[in-house]
Amino acid sequence: MINKEEIWDLFKSIFPIYRTLLGKGFNDSLDEISKTIPLTNIYEVESGQSSGSWKIPDEWIIHNAWIADLDGNKIIDFKENQFHIWQYSISTDEIISHEELIKKIAIGDEDCIPLVVTYYSKRWGFSVSANQFEKLNKDQYRVYVESEFRAGKLQIGEIFLKGRSSKEILIDAVLSCNSLANNLSGVLGAVFIAKLISQTSNHYYSYRILFSPETIGPISLFHHFPSLFKNVQGGFNLINLADKNALNYKTSRYPTLVDDTVEYTLKQFDKDATIFKYDVLTGTCGNEKAYNSLGIEVPVGALRRSILCSYPEYDTSKDDFGFIDKSKFFESLDILTQLIQNIELNRYYKHTFIGEPFLTGYGLFPKIEKDSDRIPYDYLMGFTNGELSLLDIVKLSNQPLQSFFEPLRLMVEKELLKEI
Amino acid sequence: MINKEEIWDLFKSIFPIYRTLLGKGFNDSLDEISKTIPLTNIYEVESGQSSGSWKIPDEWIIHNAWIADLDGNKIIDFKENQFHIWQYSISTDEIISHEELIKKIAIGDEDCIPLVVTYYSKRWGFSVSANQFEKLNKDQYRVYVESEFRAGKLQIGEIFLKGRSSKEILIDAVLSCNSLANNLSGVLGAVFIAKLISQTSNHYYSYRILFSPETIGPISLFHHFPSLFKNVQGGFNLINLADKNALNYKTSRYPTLVDDTVEYTLKQFDKDATIFKYDVLTGTCGNEKAYNSLGIEVPVGALRRSILCSYPEYDTSKDDFGFIDKSKFFESLDILTQLIQNIELNRYYKHTFIGEPFLTGYGLFPKIEKDSDRIPYDYLMGFTNGELSLLDIVKLSNQPLQSFFEPLRLMVEKELLKEI
Amino acid sequence: MINKEEIWDLFKSIFPIYRTLLGKGFNDSLDEISKTIPLTNIYEVESGQSSGSWKIPDEWIIHNAWIADLDGNKIIDFKENQFHIWQYSISTDEIISHEELIKKIAIGDEDCIPLVVTYYSKRWGFSVSANQFEKLNKDQYRVYVESEFRAGKLQIGEIFLKGRSSKEILIDAVLSCNSLANNLSGVLGAVFIAKLISQTSNHYYSYRILFSPETIGPISLFHHFPSLFKNVQGGFNLINLADKNALNYKTSRYPTLVDDTVEYTLKQFDKDATIFKYDVLTGTCGNEKAYNSLGIEVPVGALRRSILCSYPEYDTSKDDFGFIDKSKFFESLDILTQLIQNIELNRYYKHTFIGEPFLTGYGLFPKIEKDSDRIPYDYLMGFTNGELSLLDIVKLSNQPLQSFFEPLRLMVEKELLKEI
């Protein structure tokens, strides 16, 4: 059993670090993770390198950023709230009219300060809440931004856990966003899975768990380490695991066993759990869009409670520890535990017997105490043609997956079935 | 823009010509068409030639045909109405009892005179309306038919319009029926399409537009010019474009992109437009049955308003300019215009990029003014795997096809997509 | 026409024979069958031989078996009712307490004595009705069983009827159960089919009709005569043809033409006939489970009225001639007659013509007296692409299968269609 409180403590220690696509904040966050479970690798791509039609930006360091009235009173100050400055803002020190200033301000609802990033435009800007915006009523302001750009390295942290099989499950979580709690909860879900697998002896799949910058992370990995994903059978991106909505899932582009298993597992917990088919609409997608994008096509779904952009606190300063719900986050971890157990089992098995086997001869009948105990044996004997997954067979039987665990184990042990 | 009135004038000039399967009337009709748009070819097969199990009949010329009472009063006269004589009637001059006569008379409802053709039987017969039939109450009549048979040539007129691609769209219309206005409207629809394409620079598909005798036209073409159809990707037969019913479509035997496009286009105009699956029932089929017949299997659908045989005026003297509706015919031409535009675009495209492209780098973001402008780009980037047609992708997006026109053009121009 | 009364007489003469998996009773039953129609073969496998994970048991002969009170009054006696002794009971002669005795007794409802078999356990046991069980109220009883085990031969009787084609239809019926009338009715259904085919000149399919021991019959055949089933296209197991329920069908593992034909034929008689997809649940399966089992996979469905285990008389002494219904059994034979006729015709046909044929030229039009007569010709001409079965085409037409019999015959005769 994993200590969920230990995961929660890690959550709290990573949350306040000021992160962006690359640089110290991202690196410090990986360091924090490695205190709970060691990373096995950090992939690096240098600033200026191309990845398809993308280019790795420089590292950006923000030293100071404020808006003051002409009396020198700071109205908006990055040091008060890290969301105030648009990430990748360039330096400036200027007197600016109210009219010009508001063109460079993003305004959130009520007291939400929105996150804005402008990696590829040489500009500056500030984010404020609606309440703060109302107070900007002078004719002129002084704007001061002191930032620094320098060559750095895009980093993707990895925990690779080798299983009996070289077939891989890919788990991805975006680590590049700054202090957004619900968003960051996916990283903790991935850490939890890593801990869980690392304590599981003899797991079947190999697990490749990645902590990555958004979009450019997967794209750079694919272009610079093209063979990395060649054994991936399926997987998912984790995000928004700590709000109060029910879990839902968007499948990968082409259906995988993992997609089937997530659907089955979510419906075990909530029969109305929603499963969305693969989609690409901007604003509803996270890293799974890059993984599935044409030419890359690594099959990764998206597991989350609330959908991206679907709630007012999304990508704002209000996505903090006051917004998220600890018990819902822990419930997510419990579902992940069940999900990993199901993923490990939902594979293809093939009969070794020729014709209906004589179960008594294999010593299996003593295990069958009542008629319903026999049903999983009937269905495993009847349908393990190597083309139906365990869950396909379970669904044919109308029995719960759990009732198949022991019969499957025994039939594999007796070599009536082989794993394929 | 095509002048629809010019098409309407051609309609009126072809209508009165007395046509049958082959011969002068058919040839004169082709001549009329070529005054509006030149034919590129006339395929010919001589009388007596075999086409599979069919044989090209002789040309038939009717000089005179009447029924008179014994006082010499002509009661029924071909010169009054061309529908009175069954096409391919043999000559006769005989006194005949009322009882014998009525065995050789086809009777239409009220004042409809039905069209009867008997290409392959050596017999004669007359068609009359129910009103006329009532007046045939004498005991004996004199019947006079003076007709002539001679070796001729079956003709199929063609307008071939070469596109960027050697892939062809086949448009067919039956020209062999005599003065049936709704029936003939298909020929004018085909002429309209020919004009439209001929004024379109750089069209993708090549268009093969045929004016053909019914059934034996396509069958003879296939047997005598077997390579003619080898590049046909899809197409349709046009008929009954001028009555008051909504347009409907019967697909070709195996689904084609053209079938999809017709369905989509009709539903743009009328969301309840009916799409019928391929069927072969006698009485509901025109030339599309011959095109799709086994061993030929050229994929041709049937686009029409009323279905063949479904209205009392069908194949009678009452299918005239009083029956059809000019505004409905013009509406048909407008829908054909949209349909051809959609056919040109509804093809397969394949991404050239590897992984989600950086749209800003291609200068495409300035084109995206509001969030919904981005949707077609998302879907074109997301699904141009070469196996989904443009319309497949459009349907996934739940956006109108029109919103894809400009994004598609730009992405092809920027070489993010290639046509396949 | 087959004399159904002759089948009924055979039914009555086989019923009382005391049968088990192998031995004299089974052999005598085959002899009885061969008096009505000669067997072409008896396959034999010796006791002790392996068949996959199964082993052929010895022959078992029961000489005497009773339970008596200590005064020597026989309370339960095998000689009164053959169901009283569990088949394959070992010998014993012992005084036993009431408490111990009831552990070795199977109790049926009311006056049903259940059939129990224990081929692979060295034990003894008795079956009694609930009414008899109530009377077993003494403290002690004497139990006497005198049985004999000796090496024998498992037998499978076969009637093989060669057709024009080497493609085979497999008909199977279990013969190993002792006097169970509804169960045994399947054997008589198979005999009926054998008679029917043997009187049909020029039948297309070859028919392999088997009278087999339950489960181990098909499994042994496959292991010891592995090429026997290589030409089987489809077939079914027959059982429970004489009770009052409607016929229903469970398909074979992978759909076959025979499965389609059974479904169509049952629905001709009763449009609500139930068709079950292939399933493997113990208690609902007969020999079809062994035929379809993985590694064997001979496509055999199950045709029956009541489903196995679904009625209180099932596998008890009450499944006798008082339980079954002669008129229902005869109705089953009538449906089998229609079914075989349909199986013979529901095959793939391919057009020889290139393009729509000129039917008049083949002399087929005189056969077409009214418009609806033409429909089967339209559909046979339109869809005989070699990939649609006759029934697929019939269903497209919405016409009854019967209306296709004569058009199909004529079109094959005129060589417009060929059998494939």
Image (spheres, coloured by chain):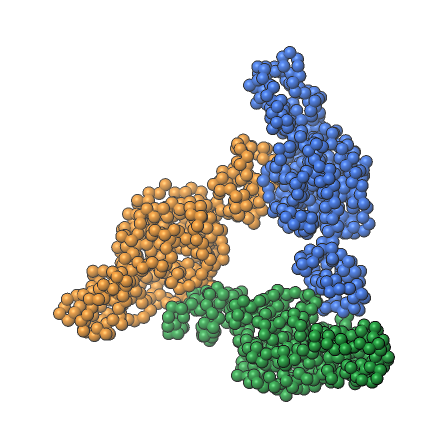
Chain colours: A orange, B green, C blue
**Horizontal and vertical percent for residue C210?**
73, 40
| The one of A164 and B96 positioned closer to us in this rendering | B96
**Horizontal and vertical percent for residue C99?**
55, 19
Q: Identify the residue at image location x=70%, y=38%.
A: C242
Residue B358 lies, with reference to residue C293, above or below; the image says: below
Q: Is residue A23 visible?
A: no
The quadrant of the rendering that contains the C terminus of chain B is bottom right
* Outermost residue toward the left in this view: A71
**Horizontal and vertical percent for residue B358?**
40, 68
Tally of numbered tags? 0
Q: Identify the residue at image location x=31%, y=67%.
A: A118
| The one of C376 and C162 positioned closer to us in this rendering | C376
* Outermost residue toward the top in this view: C71
- From the viewer's perspective, tell me whether residue A395 is left or right of residue C358: left
| The one of A131 and B91 positioned closer to us in this rendering | B91
Q: Identify the residue at image location x=62%, y=33%.
A: C312
Displayed quadrant of residue A174: bottom left
* Outermost residue toward the bottom in this view: B35
**Horizontal and vertical percent for residue B250?**
61, 68
- From the viewer's perspective, tell me whether residue C342 is left or right of residue A343: right
Q: Is residue C278 visible?
A: yes
Q: Identify the residue at image location x=37%, y=48%.
A: A332
Displayed quadrant of residue B290: bottom right
